[in-house]
Amino acid sequence: MNVVSRLYLNTLRALALMLALAGACHATPYIPADGRQVVERLPSRANPVQRELQQLRAELSKNPNDVTRATALAQRYIEQARLEGDPRYLGYAQAALAPWWTLPQPSEQVLVLRATLRQGTHQFAEALADLDTVLARDSGNVQARLTRATVQMVTGDYAGARASCMRLYSRAPQLIVQTCLSNIGSVNGDARASFDKLKTALDQHPDATPEVRTWVQTLLAEMAARLGDDANADALFKQAMAGVDPDSYLLGAYSDFLLDRGRAVEVTRLLKDKTRIDALLLRYAIALKALRSDDAAIQADSLRLRFDAAMLRGDTVHQREQARFELALRGDSKTAVRLAMLNWTVQKEPADLRILVETAAASGDAGAARTALDWIAKTRIEDRTIAPTVEKLRAMKAPA
Amino acid sequence: MMPRWRAAGLGLLLALFTAQASAHKPSDSYLTLKVAGQQVDGQWDIALRDLDMAIGLDADGNGELTWDEVRARHPDIAAYALSRLALGVPAGGGKAEPCPLAVTSHLLDDHSDGAYAVLKLRATCPNAVNTLDIDYKLLFDIDPQHKGLLRLEHGALTSTAIFAPDSARQLLRVADASRWRQFFDYVKHGVWHIWIGFDHILFLLSLLLPAVLIRREGRWQARATLRASSIEVLKIVTAFTLAHSITLTLATLGVVALPSRVVESAIALSVAVAALNNLWPVITRRLALLAFAFGLLHGFGFASVLLDLGLPQSSLLLSLVGFNVGVELGQLAIVAAFLPLAFLARATAFYRKAVLVGGSSLIVAIALVWLSERALDLKIITA
């Protein structure tokens, strides 16, 4: 990005900030008429998970420098963030690690958790630095190696990610190693074989924990969807949904699959009660729009407020979703392609490629089209869900 | 293999999914501070969810937070919030003289991600605020990813800032924002005021409607040339501008002061009179004189808006001129939209009947409603 366009973007952002803050403060505060009125729903203390978290937190606050207690609590919070899709838990996890957070060389356990949290806020370079520190001390640290592979995968460094996965051989369970490798192969020119190998590995490991099964089934379902193997994809998504409580990632992936196949009604049923999570509210609103529901505009408005709020705090973590929102719900393909390109500089997962391809086709942006086509040529990614749109990009590019 | 497999499973899984985790809105609070002289008035919106995490609001722990449960904890909420925010004015050597803060009332508001406690704040500083020293540390101890989003207002000027653990204390200048910026802010307010000030628009329109015509032998006739029409419009607009600039300046500088109810009622009356003059023409030649006389009144109206905005003493003239320029620009836009259309339509019966007579009658009706509202302090229509 050149200096002028960055300046332009910064100006736009400052303006948006002013406008959004004005908007944020525009609503009229009130006093509820009835004292018994329920004004907010909170995590209930009757919930065993919440009780456990609270107990761990109370114990830690008595011994704030107890690194074992702190890492255990941080790990539980990160787990909860994943399940509920709520980043507040990531903040709580960071707070638990506060005494060690700013140290250059904390313990390996702290480093891995710090890297995981930094990855969650897209600080990929910092996350990799922490993981490299761990691996320099202990090259056999499976957790660090796998986290490293994930970060490399998300940022599109497939060669690095594959090398990280290979180093897991004989250190991690075979199913984990295969998942690591298949995940890369599936977007790197080896889609069918990657799927088959992982499917076989899953079948050979009936002893895997329910969480791992669900995780592998989710990845397999996504691979099948990209292969255009709808029957397998649907069956695998259903198996994953029937396992442990589905997390927000699985719900999002399954919703996308259903939306692609014109099954919006199922999406609304699936996500009706999950709209606190921005990424799921987005899919819910898209499904409502597909069904021409009157509610679609209301949900889109609520989503816009949340993106405004994210811009206010200077977050860029949501650019992928925001680009999709602009394209699918607001029909503003120019803004959408700008966001998709910004997002692409940070992360390069199949979902990031997809929004780049779709916004490039809708806006006719030649730069975005070239970026996407170059990437597809370089990585040999196979994805039937975007194939027709990619053809459009090729046709668009041809005359020029 | 088994034990290791199980131990590894969850941890490994967690690593691979957190890239997707932050799909919710993270924790933010919204702080607005308005600075006027020594006084700072504020509003602070803090998520109930965050307050519950910090000090526990849900007394019965059932996950359903009622207004009674919140209300019972108001003193604790105020004490907690005030212990996390300090305002001051710089006193040299990196020190600050505190501006003691108090919570004046508690309300609620619904944001896109849930209900927020709304705290109205007031602080009085030891001297007039040029630079505000803000030390913000709400929730940073329990959620380092929390951010405080500040909107700082001073007169018509607004600036913003974001507080995070590594930028918890900030010095924000409120007085000396760039002169141009300040000027343009007031220009903007001037334009905006004309745009939303229907009474001024209607008054101007009442005077402009007959400007493309000429009254001869008791009948309206089309003016021959665009030039003649434009000169007439120019005279009217100049007279109006001159008059309201005089009173705007005098009132803003505090030389003359009139009660706002009297001014507002008189403005409504002026609209009615100007429109009535189109229906039963009394003054037909020197409409500019009418514009001047009533323009004096409208100037007082503008002044009350400008005084409400608050005027920084250091740049009184700049703001005054800026605001007036804005008003003129707004007026010019109306004239630019009106004149060509009116000129083209002036010879038609439609213009003379529907637009001049019909429009003026409508304006009279609206103005009389305003007049009764303002004079008697009623609420009939909103304007």
Image: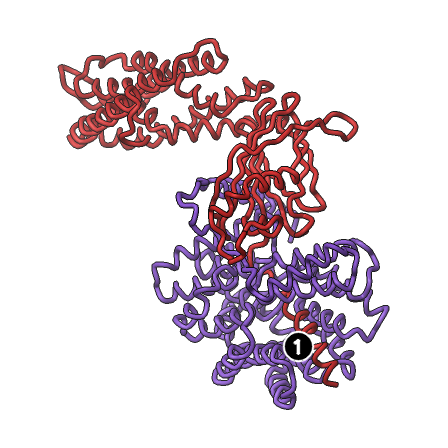
To which quarter of the image does residue A370 belong? Answer: bottom right
Q: Nearer the viewer, residue A83 or B181?
A: A83
Chain A: colour as depicted: purple
Q: Secondary structure at mark 1?
A: helix
User: Can the viewer see residue B212 in this picture?
Assistant: no
Q: Nearer the viewer, residue B331 or B82?
A: B82
Name, please, the residue furthest toward the top. B255
Q: Nearer the viewer, residue B377 or B159?
A: B377
Location of mark 1 (residue): A184
Along the horizontal axis of the image, is A329 left or right of A212? left
The chain letter under disc 1 is A
Name, please, the residue furthest toward the right. A137
Q: Position of residue B218 (x, y in %)?
A: 13, 16
Chain B: colour as depicted: red
Q: Position of residue B97 (x, y in %)?
A: 71, 26
To which quarter of the image does residue A144 belong? Answer: bottom right
